[in-house]
Structures are given as structure tokens and as C-alpha cells.
């Protein structure tokens, strides 16, 4: 799953579920939910099972890029 999210060292911004984002960060979904807890108000409500693109961008901005992603300089 993480391979489809990461391409050429970049995160493809699409709506993602908690499980997909947790996989990207290489943690279980329960841990990932704990990481999001302090930002619940700012993130807002998911649309169904998925965070929208703005929410995903905000989450990555707060948590940083996953360690396995290398950005091209």
C-alpha cells in the first residue's frame, strides 16, 4: 500500500484513511490516532472513512514527512 502512496520520493496528495496514513508512517492505526489527538479540532471531521486532501496536507505539515521518504534536493 505504501508503494502506491510514495512515488519518486514524494507523497501523492489524495484522500487517505487512517490505516493508509498509519502505513505510510510505519505505525499501527491506534498509534497514529494518538498522534492525531492533539490536532483533532484543527483537522476537522473526516468525510466517511477518508481525510480530504486539505486534511492530509495539514497532518503531514504537523507530523512531518515519514522518515522513509527522501526529497530530491
Image (cartoon, rainbow, N blue to C red):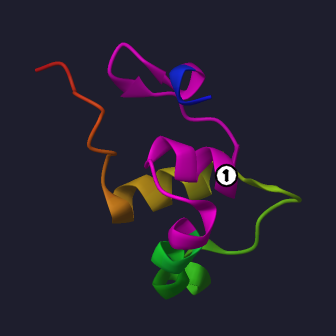
In the visual, does 16 lie left or right of 40? Answer: right
In the visual, does 3 lie left or right of 46? Answer: left
Badge 1 is on which residue? Answer: 19
In the visual, does 9 lie left or right of 28? Answer: left
Q: Residue at x 67, y 75 (%)?
A: 44
Element type where label 1 sits in the image: helix
Q: Which residue is drawn at 64% across and 44% down?
A: 20
Q: Which residue lies furthest to the right in this view?
A: 48
**Above or below, comparing residue 26 to residue 48 in the picture:** above
**Residue 18 place in picture, x, y as percent:** 66, 57
**Residue 73 place in picture, x, y as percent:** 10, 20
Please give the range of residues in magenta. Answer: 4-32
Q: Is residue 8 magenta?
A: yes
**Above or below, comparing residue 43 to residue 20 in the picture:** below
In the visual, does 48 lie left or right of 68? Answer: right
**Above or below, comparing residue 69 to residue 22 in the picture:** above
Q: Residue at x 70, y 43 (%)?
A: 15
Q: Is residue 17 magenta?
A: yes
Q: Which residue is drawn at 36% across and 57% down?
A: 61
Q: In which quarter of the image is the N terminus?
A: top right
Amino acid at each position: 500500500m505504501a508503494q502506491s502512496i510514495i512515488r519518486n520520493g514524494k507523497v501523492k496528495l489524495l484522500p487517505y484513511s487512517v490505516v493508509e496514513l498509519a502505513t505510510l508512517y510505519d505505525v499501527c492505526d491506534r498509534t497514529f490516532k494518538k498522534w492525531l489527538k492533539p490536532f483533532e479540532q484543527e483537522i476537522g471531521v473526516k468525510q466517511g472513512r477518508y481525510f480530504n486532501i486539505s486534511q492530509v496536507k495539514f497532518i503531514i505539515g504537523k507530523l512531518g514527512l515519514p522518515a522513509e521518504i527522501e526529497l530530491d534536493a
